Image: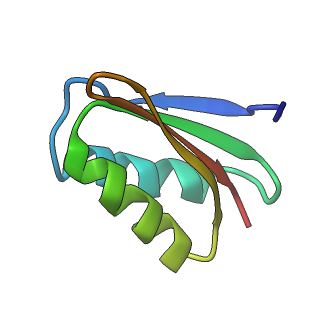
Amino acid sequence: MVDINDILDCRGEVCPYPDVKSKRKVKKMGSGEILKIIIDYPLSAERIPETLKSMGNEVLSVDKVGNSEWEILVKIK
């Protein structure tokens, strides 16, 4: 089990808002911290991990946890 430092809940929001909020949140966090992002917009489940990886962070997991809900765990670099 991973210790989560912060949670960003973007349920009910569509692109580009979850992507933008994820980038802003990651920039404010410290190296080694873990962020859980909760989304319910399918395109964001693909775009957010790609974007955060391109920023140099480590995407630990992308899990579908409901009919249309995902949890993304990111380790900040």
Residue 35's x, y, as percent? 63, 41
Above/below status of 57 relative to 24:
below
Picture quadrant of residue 31: bottom right
Q: Nearer the viewer, residue 65 or 36?
A: 65
| Image position of 58 (left or right of 19) | right
Q: Quadrant of the N terminus?
A: top right
The color scheme shown is rainbow
Residue at x 27% of width, y 30% of height: 40
Q: Nearer the viewer, residue 7 or 25?
A: 7
Residue at x 65% of width, y 31% of height: 6
Residue 56's x, y, as percent? 62, 76
Picture quadrant of residue 57: bottom right
Residue at x 34% of width, y 49% of height: 45
Above/below status of 74 relative to 66:
below
Q: What count of labels does the image hold? A: 0
Q: Nearer the viewer, residue 57 or 21?
A: 57
Q: Quadrant of the C terminus?
A: bottom right
Residue 73's x, y, as percent? 61, 44
| Image position of 46 (left or right of 63) | left
